[in-house]
Structures are given as structure tokens and as C-alpha cells.
Amino acid sequence: MTEEADPLNILAVDDDPGTVREIEALLEDSRLRFHFADTTNAFSRILEVEPIDLAIIHIHPGSESLLEPVARQLRSSEPPIALIAMVSPETESALAAAHSGVNGCVRIDDPRGVVRVVSDRVALIRSDRRQRASLRQSSDIQERYNLLLESSREAIAYLHEGLHIYANPSYLELFGYENFEEMEGFSILDLLSPGPGASDLKQLLKSLSRGDLPDDALELAAQRADGGEFRASVEFSPARYDGEACTQIMIRELVEPGDSAELQEEIEKLRSHDILTGLLNRQAFIQNLQEELEQPPEQRHMAVLQVSLDEHVKLQEKIGAAATDLLIRQTADIFRETVSDEMMPARLADHVLAARIWFEQRSEAESLATRIIDSFSGRILEIRDKSPTVTASVGLAVGGNQLFSADELLTQSESALREARRTGGNSYVRYRPSTDPHDTGDIEQWAERLRHALNNQEFRLVQLPITSMEDEEFVLVEFETRLRVEGSDEIIMPDAFRPAAIASGLAGDLDRDLIRNVVQWLENHPDNEERMLVPLSGQSLVDDDLIVEIQQLVDNGTLDGRKLILGFQEAEVRESLRKLQRVISRLGARGVRFALLDVTPDAKVDLLAKNIDVDFIKLGGDVSAALRNDEVARRALEGLATAASENDIRVIAPQVENTSELAALWQFGITLVQDDFVRDEQE
């Protein structure tokens, strides 16, 4: 949301609330939020609880006693709050307003004047907001860049006319200086001398002062503070420091062949560790998991834990983008208090940390998860001038007698972490696979069953029609598959086998099978004119081969992109919006549209619409129960429908039970409803 779209809080002071309503009606600005006070006490209470942006006071003989205390309190606010006076025709009111130093004055019997004066002040406030936001953003970017410089392993310095004006810690360490004061003002001639190429450094210095920088790296001799020398590769590039043009110099030590073992060790450390936190990076963590799982300790099992701060997005907004690295570092430091090096602490993503533990009893893994939660719970961080209190969530995936792959354990712990955050945070959730209620087998048994079904084409295609209450010509059909158990009449629904497919890494294979079935159905129905909603799993977002396959089917006309709607579970894509954006960009250009599925009424549609271009939202859960019994759910559903309409997104309701519920949906603007019958397309 932009600064201009944020509502402004206006406090109106008068003994007649009707005046406030008249002003509100005159301005006709839905982004202005009015508050009313008729006494100094009421005025003070509102200032304490609401972030007031502008105050308006009606001055007349009965309210002049309010003017001075109101003006004084507004001036002492931080920042000061502007005050506009609406005065009665009497001269005394205008004189009182002028004496108190108001920021604007207008006669109350001049409606156009009221609108003009208030609107001008509102525009000024919004302009100031935008300017401050731009300055904050610019400052955040500069501070974040400075943080990256400070934490970089590259030796980097800034020069002005050949003199050092800044050097990062790696640069100081390379040359053996304790702090920048020891080398401040040094010329590059004090640290560098001609190398094998016999570079003329004095001529180089003149070139730098003219902004004429060498295109290639120079090999020079460099001198440390203790007199030692080393060969260096030196690169120059234009830069800015404190708003002034300067030259950046980056120096890399050229290692002698005899030092190759030490160099290799350093390179390996850089390759396997996260620079910001010093923890293992994602690639190294997964590789170590895979290697350990190939030869697991006898009578022991592996558990993987994923950890993140709760409400990290709000926390980041509070501290500012420039302090993100500090937040991540402090999070990693707290994590290390509980997780030892032998547990392979790692950073998997911006805000997600991980560890693994080998255990004999599952309680050992659960105890570690509890200790991690306790170490974060209520912790006060010190991030510049902010002191946020934090909690964390943990997702725990526990291996059993069946061997799990590293990817399976990561997927399971990620799912558990997502669930822990969804349930309020400050807790851990252990992954428990969803299975057929008639089956007590584990995920491995499910995986075997699903592979057999794929190999023997046991998935049956069905169609679920979606109709419009306002347009009889609208035709949309959702395709899905159901598993027919071999040698049985039992049909297993997607809700039963889909979680197991995700956990076993087979969801992408099921998606391919669904696409194959849809293509086969289209071959048998060449005259089809229906729009087709095809649900895919989150795993397909990272399956480039499948996306390319769909693209080719659209390009060669097998699938009509204008009729194809690809659906993804909202819970699965919530943490993968970038991946979905890339798929939308790729296929959307070919006419393909997109839908979010199983969306809960309290979903933040506005935020989703800002990041991804979707045309449909299909609700999940029991809408009928919400419409009948839950007033909170009804209000949430109404809010979702309004937000969707504002973003040109159509909402699809699942099956409802009676016409009164259809009427309620219609009232909310939800006109697409899934029919209560299923067309079975395969026998």
C-alpha cells in the first residue's frame, strides 16, 4: 500500500457532532478517518490512542475556552500537529484563531472554502509522507549497502584523489591495520608499488583523479603494516561515498602455489557457509543430510528442525530494510545458544534456520524444539534504536524406521513450520502425514501405492462444474483425479492422497498425470468450449520441465491458453510467491489465467493481489457452516469478497446446501458456485 493510500486521522473539536459529519460529507474522501472530541479531556484521550495527522476546531463563543489548551497540546506533540480553525462570522473568533497561531483559518459558512483549506492541508500532509517515505527508503538502501560492505569478505576501500577515505574490515585485515584511523589519508602509493607489469602508479594516480579507471585488474605489489609484502590483484571502479563521487578499489591477494591447500580450505568454507551468519548454507546442509542418511548410525533416527521468527514481515517493516542483516545475525546468535555445531546449524532462507539431530527416542528431538522455542520466547533484541520482543516457531520432521530422503525431511519440516506459524507461533509442530482414515500405513506405504497407481493409470479424471448465478453463458469446469483402488470399488479422494504425494515428492508426478488425462479428454472432446480449471501442486512451481511441457502444449494448440486456468493451493504458494510470479509471467503471455485454491475467508487478498496476478479465488472449508453460525466468519467472507472485487478477482464458492445461502453469497457479490454433482469422465 502506498503512503498516499494510507488513511489520515483527523480530529475535529466542537460541541456539535453534526458539524463533523457535515465536514466529512463535504470532503468526500474515504481515506479520511474522523474522530470527535467536545472537551479537553476527550481531546487528550484521543491523542493518546490515535495517530492524529490533522486537527480542526470550530471556534465560536461557546468553544473559545477549548482553543488555547488544544493549540498548546498540538504544538507540543512530536511531530507537531497542524490545526485548522473554522470561525464564526464574528470578528472575535477570527482574532482568537490568529492569536493562537493556527495553521489555517476559514469561515464555517463558506463550505467551498472549508473544502479548499482542509484539502490543501491534507495534500500537504500526504506529500510530506511520500517525501519522508522516499528518504527512509533511500536511507535504508544506503545503510543496507554499508552493512554489506562491512560484512563483505572482499577487501574494499574508497579513494578520493588517490587518498583513502573508507576501508572495510576485510581491507584493514588484509593490510594488518587495527582500525581505519591508522590508514586514513594514506595514498595508494603508501600501500602499493609496481608489480611484474611495471605499472606507473603516479600516472595511475593522475588517471584516477580524472576519473579514467583501468578496464582490467592490475597485478601490483602490496605492503602490510608490519612491512611484509604480497602480490595483489587490484580492481578500480567508480563509486559514491556520502553522496560524493569517488573511486572504489578492491584488492585480492594472489596466493602462491605452495599455499593451495590453505586456499582450498578457505574456498570450501566460503562455498559451504552463509557469509552473513557463519552457519551452513542451504546447499551444504542438504548435501550433508544426504551423505549422513546414506550411512545412518545404528539404532538412531534423524530429525530436521526449521525455525523462523514469528511475524517476521511485520518485524522487518518495524526495524527497516537496512537493519535486516542485523536481525538475521541476532536470530542466528540466539539459535546457536541452543543448537550445537554437531547439529549442523544452517540458514536455509532469509529468515529460516535449520538443524538436524540424531536420536534414539523421539522425545529428544521434541525436547530440542522446546528449548529453541524457550530461547526465543520474549527475547528482547537490540537493533539500532529499536528493541523488539520476539518469539519463534519450529517445524519438526521426525524420521522413523523407513528411510527418508533429505528432501522429504525438509519438505515435512517446512510444512510443520508453516503450520506452527499459522496457529499463532511461539510453539513447535511435529509433522504428521495425512493418510486414508482406513489405512494405518506410513508415508512410505503411501508412496508405494501412489507409484503403483501412476504406473498402472489408476487415477480417474472427473469434472466439477462451476456455474454463475448471474450469467447462464458462463461455463467453467474444474478437473481433478481420484484414485480407484485396484481390485476394489473404493475411491480415494484427493484430500486423502494429496498430502502423502507432497510429503513423498510425488505431487509433481500426479500433476503430470492430471495434465495427461486432461489432454486425452480433449482429444475425445475436440469441440469443447468450456473453460478448464486444472489444480496443480506447489512442487510444480519449481518443476521447469513441467512448466515447459505445459507451455509447449499451449503453443502447439493441444491446450487452448485462453480457456486454461491453472490453480495452486494458497497455503502452498504463500511462501513461494516469487516462483508463482515467474510461472504467471511465462504462461500468462499465452492467455493462461490463474487461480488460488482453498482460500480461507481471512486471507489477505489485497496483499496477494499486489504480488501475483490471479483471476479467480476458490474458497475452501465449509462455507455453509460459516454462513449459518459464525458472524465473524461472515464478516471475514464479506471482506474477502470486497477486496477481491476491488482487484478484479472472481470468487468461487464450494457447494452450498440451500437457496438462502446462495442469497447470502449473492449479497456479498460471490456469484460463482460449484455445482453439487460430479461428471465422471472415465469408466
Image: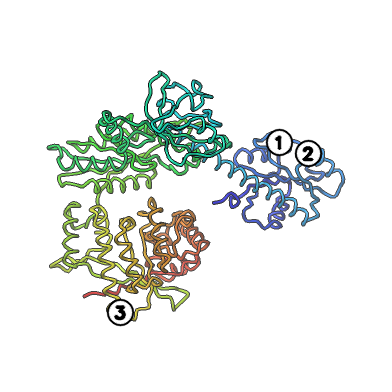
Name the spot of residue 60 as percent of width and height, x first. 81, 45
- For residue 75, which numbered disc appears in the image? 1
Relative to 620, 385 lies left or right:
right
Residue 82 in view here: yes
- Regarding mark 1 in the picture, which secondary structure is present there? helix
CB within 8 Å, label 1 to label 2: yes
Q: Which of 431/557 is in front?
A: 557
Q: Are marks 3 and 2 in contact (CB under 8 Å)?
A: no
Q: Is residue 21 above or below residue 393?
A: below
Residue 315, how many percent across, how many down? Answer: 46, 40
For the residue marked with disc 3, what is the amino acid?
Answer: His
Q: CA distance from mark 1 to mark 2?
A: 10 Å
Where is residue 195, by image quadrant? top left
Callout 2: helix, strand or loop? loop
Instruction: Choose mark 3 or mark 1, whichever is in front.
Output: 3
Mark 3 Cα shell of 10 Å, populated few (<14), some (14-19), many (≥20): few
Is residue 491 found left or right of 634 in the rendered image? Answer: left
The disc placed on residue 525 is 3
Which residue occupies the extreme top position in the image? 226
Q: Quadrant of residue 336?
A: top left
Q: Position of residue 549 (x, y in %)?
A: 30, 65
Q: Amino acid type of disc 1?
A: Arg
Marker count (numbered): 3
Query: Residue type at mark 2?
Result: Gly
Residue at image point 20% right, 36% down: 358
The residue that mark 2 highlights is 101
Q: Earlier in the sequence, mark 3 or mark 1?
A: 1
Task: Quote the CA–CA distance across marks 3 and 2.
Answer: 78 Å
Q: Earlier in the sequence, mark 3 or mark 2?
A: 2
